Image (cartoon, rainbow, N blue to C red):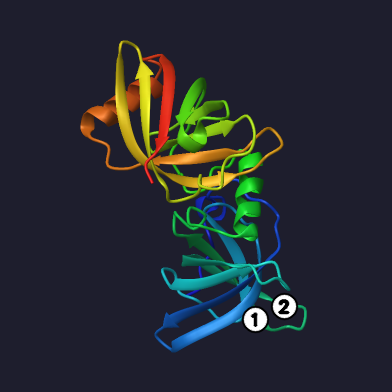
Amino acid sequence: MTTTPKASERRDGPRIDLRLRVRWSAQTSAGLVSGEAEASDVSPKGLRLESEHNLDNGTDLDLRVDVGGDTDELVARGKVMWCRTHKSPTGRDVFDVGVAFESDWLARDRGPLGQALARIFAMNSYEPARTFERTRVEVSASGAGPLESGALTMVDLSAGGMQLRAAGQLADVVRAGVAVETTMQAGTGSRTLPGRIAWVASSPQGDRFGVEFVGLGKDDTAFVDAVRAGQLEPAAVGIVLKA
């Protein structure tokens, strides 16, 4: 069934006018269908592609994303959120398809293409792998092991994690999926928050990386919420790689 997307479906977050090649396949009621298309309106949450097939809302897609003529590609999973028809220049019916990614499509280990996309999103204040509302902060952070050599700053905090900026380049072992332990001091107390690195990206101001909190208890969540709400003033942050 073809539907007209609501505004909230078309604009699930800031988008960049990138042009990427997507090869996709889907299991439908008519069997396995596949195609190749140029993607546009790319964001950390999804993209839009043009298809010769009318895809039902909720259809799961397997996607391979690249820039064309390059061996590097990203493998991702997505879901059709909307589909609408229009006429091609030759008069054929073609379909614009809105695709929502799995939340972790850029959180996995990735090659040059994935690093480039993460860098673009980071430089435009987007944060892959996180959909929580973020609170801007500027708190000095200290690191241990591979993170010890460079100055770190926590630049935002959410219920789901935080973003940190390094003064220079991060070591190669600082990569998506690595477990971390964050100790945050605020007010008269502190909490040790388990998590993992969600993404890593380079920028002219220094490398950045996102930490996703994992398995927080009720008291930990309340502590983070109090810091975000300004009820507790963060004083220091320490982060250790657990790999």
Q: Residue 49: which quarter of the image?
A: bottom right
Q: Position of residue 227 (x, y in %)?
A: 38, 21
Question: Residue 173 versus residue 178: which sits nearer the camera?
Answer: 173
Q: Nearer the viewer, residue 151 or 200?
A: 151
In the rendering, which numbered label is found on residue 93? 1
Q: Nearer the viewer, residue 182 or 77?
A: 182
In the image, residue 51 above or below residue 72:
below
Q: Residue furthest left?
A: 218
Q: Amino acid at mark 1?
A: Asp
Question: Which residue corresponds to the image point at 43% horizontal and 72% vertical from the top-left?
Answer: 59
User: Which mark identifies residue 88?
Assistant: 2
Question: Is 227 positioned to the left or the right of 136 in the image?
Answer: left
- Percent x, y for residue 23? 59, 76
Mark 1, secondary structure of its residue: strand
CA separation in Å, label 1 and label 2: 6 Å
Helix, strand or loop at mark 2: loop
Q: Where does residue 129 sit, x and y in percent of width and height?
A: 47, 48
Task: Tell whether label 2 touches label 1 (CB within 8 Å).
Answer: yes
Residue furthest out toward the top: 188
Residue at 56% x, 71% y: name it.
64
Q: Earlier in the sequence, mark 1 or mark 2?
A: 2
Q: Going 53% across and 69% down the picture, which residue do you hit? A: 83
**Percent position (x, y) of residue 127?**
54, 43
Q: Quadrant of residue 236?
A: top left
- Residue closest to the far right: 89
Indicate the quadrant where residue 91 lies: bottom right
The number of numbered badges drawn on the structure is: 2
Q: Is residue 226 above or below residue 150?
A: above
Indicate the amino acid at tag 2: Ser
**Residue at left offset 41%, top offset 14%:** 233
Q: Residues within 10 Å of mark 2 (few under 14, many from 20)?
A: few
Sort mark 1 into few (<14), some (14-19) or many (20+) by Cα contacts within 10 Å: some
